[in-house]
Image (cartoon, rainbow, N blue to C red):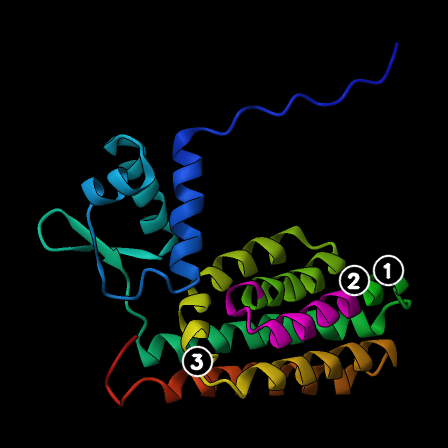
């Protein structure tokens, strides 16, 4: 029998609305604290209110949206305390990831993937494309956890990174942070290629610490973003 392509089910309107809203939130197009109304979003997206309501419920479950007032929603604020906790979690997990990868047999395919993403970030920096730069940043960290083959670690990281993106938006508000990220990613790649477990761990600690500190600098003491 001839090989057939797998049937791809049509994406629902709710899924498309969800993708559009999540992308807008993670890019900072809809800023933290801004009220969100179903009717306005439905009008903007050209859909009924039902898929908008369903998408907002899903975004609320993920922690990107919170209830505001009696029936309203808004992009949730992130407190300084949450930023510290989230990056504490990321450091624990991602340091373990790079230590595991540095101790493994060299993975040429992984190095090629990471270097390709690094080159994309260099190009995006030159183009001042902040939104895509952040998307590629996510892909860089996802490539690391995927390379471990640990599905549970991937699932946990996917959830944590959604929330930390709300903080990272503010961390990269300072233009000099972009070339710093590129240099830090390069250090991680080199440590992995050298199979230097300690250097890989330290490179990841420095990267996440700098990102955390940049995010905290954008928030006043006792404040939130």
Q: Is residue 107 above or below residue 69?
A: below
Q: Earlier in the sequence, mark 1 or mark 3?
A: 1
Front residue (pair 115, 130)? 130
> CA separation, marks 1 and 3?
33 Å
Please provide percent x and percent y for residue 62.
Answer: 39, 52
Marks 2 & 1, CB-CB < 8 Å contact:
yes
Q: Left or right: 197 with respect to 150?
A: right
What's drawn in magenta, residue-wise? 113-132
> CA separation, marks 3 and 2?
27 Å
Question: In the rendered image, which residue does mark 1 sit on?
Answer: 109
Q: Left or right: 99 with respect to 66?
A: right
Q: Is residue 132 above or below residue 194?
A: above
Q: Residue furthest top?
A: 1
Viewport quadrant of the C terminus? bottom left
Residue 178 is drawn in which quadrant? bottom right
Q: In the rendered structure, does residue 124 fall within the stretch colored magenta?
A: yes
Question: In the rendered image, which residue does mark 3 sit on?
Answer: 173
Please provide percent x and percent y for residue 27.
Answer: 44, 62
Please provide percent x and percent y for residue 93.
Answer: 60, 70
Residue 118 is drawn in which quadrant? bottom right
Considering the whole magenta stretch, tell me its main secondary structure: helix
What residue appears at the point 42 percent right and 76 percent down from the top-left corner? Answer: 85
> CA separation, marks 2 and 1?
6 Å
């Amino acid at each position: 029998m001839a090989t057939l392509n797998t049937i791809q089910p049509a994406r629902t309107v709710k899924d498309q609305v969800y993708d559009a809203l999540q992308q807008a939130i993670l890019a900072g197009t809809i800023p933290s604290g801004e009220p969100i109304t179903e009717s306005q979003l439905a009008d903007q997206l050209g859909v009924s209110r039902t898929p908008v309501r369903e998408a907002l419920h899903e975004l609320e479950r993920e922690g990107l949206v919170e209830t505001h007032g009696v029936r309203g929603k808004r992009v949730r604020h992130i407190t300084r305390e949450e930023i510290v906790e989230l990056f504490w979690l990321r450091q624990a997990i991602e340091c373990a990831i790079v230590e595991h990868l540095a101790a493994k047999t060299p993975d040429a395919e992984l190095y090629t993937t990471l270097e390709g993403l690094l080159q994309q970030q260099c190009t995006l920096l030159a183009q001042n494309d902040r939104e895509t730069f952040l998307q590629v940043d996510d892909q860089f960290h996802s490539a690391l956890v995927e390379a471990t083959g640990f599905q549970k670690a991937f699932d946990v990281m996917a959830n944590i990174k959604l929330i930390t993106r709300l903080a990272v938006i503010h961390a990269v508000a300072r233009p000099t942070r972009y070339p710093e990220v590129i240099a830090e990613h390069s250090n991680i790649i080199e440590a992995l290629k050298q199979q230097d477990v300690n250097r890989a761990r330290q490179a990841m600690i420095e990267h996440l610490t700098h990102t955390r500190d940049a995010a905290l600098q954008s928030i006043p003491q006792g404040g939130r973003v």
